[in-house]
Image (cartoon, rainbow, N blue to C red):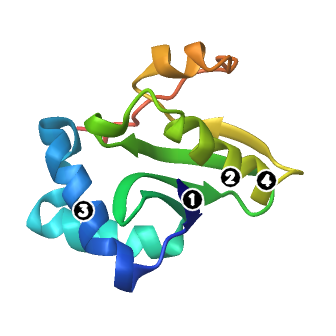
Amino acid sequence: MIVRLYKRATDENKLMNIIKQEGEDWSEYISPAGSTKYKAALEKSITYVAYEGDVLCGYSRSIDDCGFYIYICDLLVAPKYRSKGIGRKLMECIFEGYPDHTVFVMSDVDEYYKKQGYKKEGSIFEVLKPG
């Protein structure tokens, strides 16, 4: 397995195909309007991809909070490649690339991160528009 930084020219279509396979939970990223925004976000974020041979089997997307913290926004491994340590390897890349930063995960799959031994710290809330 090879894990490296995302390259739009070689990775974009493969990465979007993994998202399409996930279905409803990831549909915002593959809708016509969402797809354009998400592709731009992939380039502006800290995005790592994992390859098994020539198959893109997983990725992570994180944002740097101006040197204070790293927030992992997305971590996805294709179903066929799960339980092989790929998600953990993608997470390790963040720690290797940003050793002096505190890393947080924005998650709706808490059990996965608990299983990895990560500490739950706080909550995340959606702020709704008034009215």
Give the residue at the far front of this rendering.
53
Q: Which residue is mark 4?
A: 96
Within 10 Å of disc 3 (Cα), the crowding (few <14, some 14-19, many 20+) is some
Image mark count: 4
Identify the amino acid type marked 3. Met
Marks 4 and 2 sit apart, C-alpha to C-alpha, by 5 Å
Does 109 sit above or below residue 31?
A: above
Q: Position of residue 112 (x, y in %)?
A: 48, 20
With 7 as the anchor, is 101 left or right in this view? Answer: right
Identify the amino acid type marked 4. Glu
Marks 3 and 4 sit apart, C-alpha to C-alpha, by 25 Å
Q: Which element carries disc 1, helix, strand or loop?
A: strand
Residue at (31%, 62%) from the top-left corner?
15
Marks 2 and 1 sit apart, C-alpha to C-alpha, by 8 Å
Residue closest to the eye, 65 or 53: 53
With 28 as the anchor, is 43 left or right in this view? Answer: right
Q: Name which quarter of the figure residue 114 lies in.
A: top right
Residues under numbered marks 4 and 2 in contact, where contact means CB atoms less than 8 Å apart: yes
Residues under numbered marks 2 and 1 in contact, where contact means CB atoms less than 8 Å apart: yes
Q: Which element carries disc 2, helix, strand or loop?
A: helix
